[in-house]
Amino acid sequence: EEKRLPEALKMAKEAVWLAPASASARYLEARILLQLKRDGEAQNELAVMRKLQKAASDRLEREMAGSAYRDPQLAGEGK
């Protein structure tokens, strides 16, 4: 399992490159970095992940407070 961590890290970095705003991809990369004992890099990725999560949460709150938010589960009702 440990032998495959460098390969897993390469794939996680690719995922971050493809979707830099993905908190999930950042979290995955951080977990692998922690397993590789690269704590500083992992902490950096976790910090970015937290910022992304906060931004997404703030955006959702703004949408829900205004008229821009439409619940996708309710969008189909009344047809």
Image (cartoon, grey):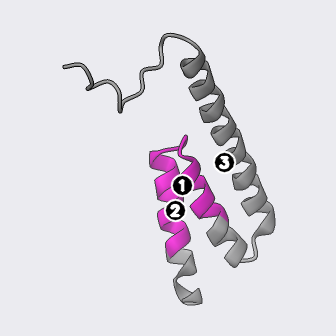
- Is 72 situated left or right of 44 in this image? left
Classify 10 Å Cα crowding around label 1: few (below 14), some (14-19), many (20 and above).
Answer: many
On the image, the x and y values in percent for residue 34 come to 72, 72
| Pointer 2 with pointer 1, Cβ within 8 A | yes
**Magenta stretch encompasses residue 22:** yes
Judged from the image, the secondary structure of the residue bearing numbered disc 2 is helix
- Real-space CA distance between mark 1 and mark 3, rounded to the nearest whole angstrom: 9 Å
Quarter assignment of residue 71: top left
On the image, the x and y values in percent for residue 17 come to 50, 49
**In the image, what residue type sits under mark 1?**
Ala
27 relative to 53, above or below:
below
On the image, the x and y values in percent for residue 46 come to 72, 54
Residue marked by disc 3: 49
| Pointer 2 with pointer 3, Cβ within 8 A | no
Residue marked by disc 1: 25
Classify 10 Å Cα crowding around label 3: few (below 14), some (14-19), many (20 and above).
Answer: many
Please state the extent of the stretch shown in magenta in the rendering.
8-30
